[in-house]
Amino acid sequence: MVEFVKNFIDLLFGDMMSNFDVRMLVMWAIGGILIFLAIKKEMEPTLLLPMGFGAILVNLPISGAITQVINGEVQEGALSVLFDAGIANELFPLILFIGIGAMIDFGPLLSNPKLMIFGAAAQFGIFFTLCLASMFFPINDAASIAIIGAADGPTSIVVANKLNSEYLGAIMVAAYSYMALVPIIQPPVIKLLTTKKERMIRMPYTQTEVKKITRILFPIVITVVAGLVAPASVSLVGFLMFGNLIRECGVLNSLSETAQKVLANLITIFLGITIATKMHYESFLAPDTLLILGLGLFAFIFDTAGGVMFAKLLNIFLPKGKKINPMIGAAGISAFPMSGRIVHKMGLAEDPQNFLLMHSIGVNVSGQIASVIAGGLILNFFM
């Protein structure tokens, strides 16, 4: 009887224990932290929860979730198949852009077009990080890493895929993690670069009626212009603007609502849990991964700083009554609408009557466009 039990245990757990690695425990802990942030701190739960659970799923001994060679035979895993079907060919990021485009109201930007310059200024960190990353990685990998600073997960995936970066997994994880950590990363940077007096600057907002024809033409014109300036960005910009056109045309309201909610949430879940296929301990727990995470954070911080410092520079030349609250420059990254809301909340914390939401959201949506164009420029340079 004892021998039978021993054989039974060996049959059940023998292969599993022989394939166990202590590094799996580290990945379980990382997955647990992501789940904790999603549930307890409510940081992008639709993204971090599936990423965290997926990290545990793919780091189980002989996990059937990912494709592995077991006993000399290749056994396909569901998540690996899903990765090849949706991320390797960039399908999921592009479809997600339709949902994001349907969520965006370009009204604040169209009412005050000069806000577009802050979206461009907030991409400074991408190119600065490119120079820094090129000291450690081949140029295509360095370019892919630099895009993390845009705080735009879909763009990061597309750029890394097209440039054939071997660090796609670390880049994806860094891009989406920093997007979720915007409420933690941005406020200290903004406070470090601004004074209380600057954070209390009020910016009156006069709502200008934007004609329907303008809202309809805007996504079309932006797609054409982006295609001429950065042809490689056409698919990214095009899907984003197509989603916005669905929103603004006025004849596809049910489709727009589906794109904003059901489609965007479903693809985000698939993205999150599929990204985890690149979080296997063998490839993830490596010095290069830690360096990429550090460079991504560097890019993110300098993008935030670039927007703030550009606003402070403009204030030198603006008359007293026309000063810009430099915090809105930080909203020029692509993390929509999180970054815009954070700037608004920080303004209210300094002055309960200081309403910066329309300005910060206008900058935020311009950053969405600018980050995609920046990704297209990177592809033009290095493809």
Image (cartoon, rainbow, N blue to C red):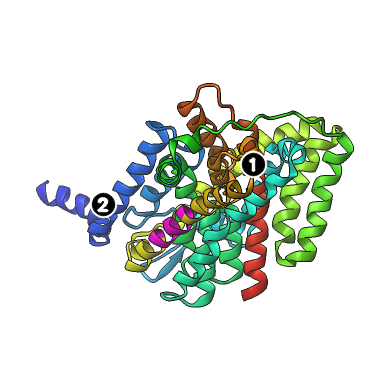
Which residue is rendered at x = 79% and y = 39% of the image?
Answer: 246
Q: Position of residue 177 (x, y in %)?
A: 45, 48
42 to 121, vertically: above or below: above
Residue type for callout 1:
Pro
Q: Residue furthest right?
A: 213
Q: Quadrant of the rendered structure where residue 208 is?
A: top right
Q: Position of residue 197 (x, y in %)?
A: 47, 35
Residue type for callout 2:
Leu
Question: Majority secondary structure of the magenta segment?
Answer: helix
The foreground one among 360 and 204 is 204
Which quadrant, please, contains the C terminus?
Answer: bottom right
Give the residues drawn in magenta, as a range.
Answer: 293-301
Which residue is rendered at x = 62% and y = 32% of the image?
Answer: 203
Q: Which residue is mark 1?
A: 319
Whichever of callouts 2 and 1 sits on the residue coming sooner in the sequence is 2
| 298 inside magenta stretch | yes
The foreground one among 214 and 66 is 214
242 to 14, vertically: above or below: above
Q: Position of residue 96 (x, y in %)?
A: 64, 47
Could you tell whether 345 is left or right of 362 in the image? left
Which residue is rendered at x = 42% and y = 48% of the image?
Answer: 54
| 223 inside magenta stretch | no
Q: Which residue is mark 2?
A: 25
Question: Visible in this render: residue 78?
Answer: no
Q: Quadrant of the rendered structure where residue 296 is?
A: bottom left
Which secondary structure lies at badge 2? helix
